[in-house]
Amino acid sequence: MAKLVDQLRDEVDILAYRAGDIEALGRLITRWQARIYSYVLAMIGNRDAAWDISQELWLSVVNRLGRGAEIENFTPWLYRVAHNRCVSHLRKTRRLVEGDAACEDAVDERDEGSLTFALRAEDARVVRECLGELTLTLRETMVLFYMDGLSLDDVAEVLGVPRGTVQSRLHYGRLAIKKALVKKGYDDDRR
């Protein structure tokens, strides 16, 4: 239900923007900017490059929305634009290879005075390291599905592959992360 509400909210804001409501565009960007930046950062692994790519992406999105480009489902369309920008950047920097370098995204160092928070932050850092060890194809699939919460069908649309391929990539991605976690000392006994 929430996904349908979000989709309707996006469609309303797009229509309002096309009718001249600049604030509708601001709402749309505000709703998606952090998620898109996180996705680009996970794919690129460099904060400055991810910021630049995200800004260029929004300029492109605004331009296409303003021209009245037909957009059937905004979420996969937006992620597809981001995907294309990431692939283009990685090709330019000659980093589009299997076994792409690990993401350098550091853990937010908030002091909440809690051992639980510290353990969760450490676990999250280790999982991000493991995610960074995956091939670009597996990493992107895992990020879109698990971190960004896209459905299998939406991930398939973003990546331009069949749903079964997405399921297969998720399976192999989970296996690879589990293997990497065991290698780092995380096993079934540690929770």
Image (cartoon, rainbow, N blue to C red):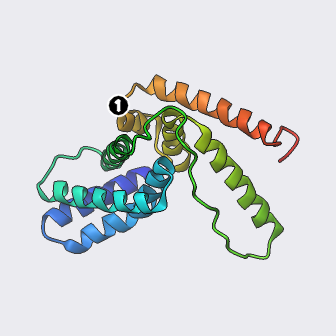
Residue corresponding to mark 1: 160
Name the residue at 60% across, 33% down: 173
Report the residue that reaches farthest toward the front. 94
Q: Quadrant of residue 168?
A: top right
In front of the other: 66 or 96:
96
In-front residue for pair 85/191 = 85
Left or right: where 29 falls relative to 62:
right
Q: At 55% across and 43% down in the image, what residue appears? A: 101
- 78 vs 2, left or right, is left
Count of numbered badges drawn on the protein: 1
Pointer 1 local density, CA inside 10 Å: few below 14, some 14–19, many at least 20: few
**Which residue occupies 47% across, 23% down?**
164
Is 44 placed left or right of 191 in the picture? left
Q: Is residue 181 left or right of residue 38?
A: right
Q: Is residue 111 visible?
A: yes
Displayed quadrant of residue 60 = bottom left
* Residue 183: % across, % down: 78, 37
Question: Element under label 1?
Answer: loop
Q: Amino acid at mark 1?
A: Gly
Q: Is residue 61 above or below residue 24?
A: above
Question: Could you say where residue 155 lies in the image, as x and y percent from the top left?
Answer: 43, 37
Q: Is residue 1 visible?
A: no
Q: Residue 59 in the image: x percent, y percent?
A: 24, 61
Q: Position of residue 99 (x, y in %)?
A: 55, 34
Residue 163 in the image: above or below residue 107: above
User: Who's the residue at 18% across and 72% down the image?
Assistant: 21
